[in-house]
């Protein structure tokens, strides 16, 4: 049925419909969907937020992320951003960067604050 009323209707299963209503996002909230494809819950949350606040939708497959981006455009959801990322690796990547000295605040000389 998706595509029948393109931009007017998005078919979802019941759990995907219920979750955003239970979450009850406010227009001031920031939401992270760590396994967002195909984008139903993320777009539903962004819609319930009235286009305000922010919804960050992650998926590890670029083609799936593009589908979410396309739906955000069709539905006029400027508060939804979709990025390609493997959420299972986010903490490991942050730890790796921290260990390699890539993280942390830098002062005006470009040195990390904890090195100054």
Image: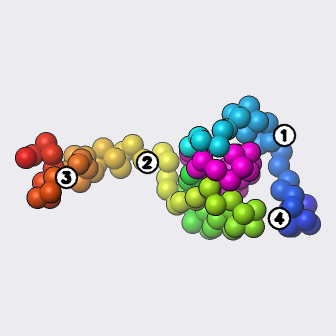
Label 3 to label 1, Cα distance in Å? 47 Å
Circle nearer the N terminus (3, 1): 1
Q: Does the rendering let one see residue 100?
A: no
Residues 84 and 111: in front is: 111
Q: Name the residue under label 3.
A: 106
Q: Position of residue 38 (x, y in %)?
A: 70, 56
Q: Mark 4 points at which residue?
A: 7
On residue 32, the disc is none
On residue 89, the disc is 2
> Is 25 included in the stretch rendered in magenta?
no
Circle nearer the N terminus (3, 2): 2
Question: Which stretch did the figure color magenta?
Answer: 32-55
Q: Name the residue under label 1.
A: 14
Pointer 1 with pointer 4, Cβ within 8 A: no
Circle nearer the N terminus (2, 4): 4
> SS for tag 2?
helix
Quick one: label 2, few (<14), some, or many (20+) residues within 10 Å? few
The residue at the point 24 percent across, 47 percent down is 104
The residue at the far left in this view is: 116
């Amino acid at each position: 049925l998706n595509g029948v009323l393109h931009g007017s209707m998005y078919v979802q299963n019941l759990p995907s419909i219920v979750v955003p209503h239970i979450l009850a996002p406010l227009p001031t909230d920031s939401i992270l969907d760590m396994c967002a494809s195909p984008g139903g819950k993320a777009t539903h949350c962004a819609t319930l937020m009235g286009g305000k606040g922010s919804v960050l939708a992650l998926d590890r497959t670029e083609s799936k992320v593009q589908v979410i981006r396309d739906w955000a455009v069709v539905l006029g959801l400027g508060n939804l951003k979709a990025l390609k990322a493997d959420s299972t690796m986010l903490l490991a990547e942050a730890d790796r960067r921290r260990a390699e000295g890539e993280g942390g605040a830098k002062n005006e000389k470009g040195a990390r604050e904890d090195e100054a």
